[in-house]
Amino acid sequence: MKNSLRVLIIEDNESLLLLLNHYLGKRHEVHSSKNGLDAMSKMSNGLIPDVILLDWNMPIMDGERFLEGIRSSSFYKNIPVIIISGSKDYEQLSEKIEITHSFYKPFDPKVLDQKIEELFI
């Protein structure tokens, strides 16, 4: 596993975003966006994450549209994506759009961090 992973968190819930930034930021380089459009902008400006944590229901650009966008790009399509959502709307699309793993809110950040690390062992 790499010592420090570059993690992009795309989450519109400010409290959860702060919690994940704090917890994951102890061991990883963390970047955050409040919607998919902002995340796409950051990625097109040079941010290449090792893993993406993606909320499904967000304003402006939701998780489905964001994921369809990166999966259609040969440059970004292999980045692991972990869904973090309070809704299970994504489940019917999970095979079609290649979701690496998912966590239903609320979840334990320690378990999430373990799953992130398992991806790179």
Image: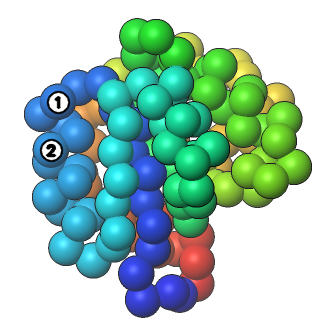
Residue at point 78%, 48% (across, down): 77
Q: Is residue 82 visible?
A: no
Residue 19 vs residue 114, the one in the foreground:
19
Say whether residue 32 is left or right of residue 98. left
60 vs 70, left or right, is left
Q: Position of residue 97 (x, y in %)?
A: 76, 33
Give me the residue at 87% from left, 49% from top.
74
Question: What residue type is disc 1 on?
Answer: Glu
- Secondary structure of the residue carrying tag 2 is helix
Q: Give the residue type at disc 2.
A: Leu
Q: Quadrant of residue 109?
A: bottom left
Q: Rate crowding at label 1 as few (under 14), some (14 to 19) or many (20 or more) other CA atoms within 10 Å.
A: few
Residue sitting nearer the eye, 46 or 36: 46
The quadrant of the image that shows the C terminus is bottom right
Q: Are marks 1 and 2 in contact (CB under 8 Å)?
A: yes
Residue 14 — which label? 1
Q: Is residue 79 visible?
A: yes
Q: Which residue is mark 2?
A: 18
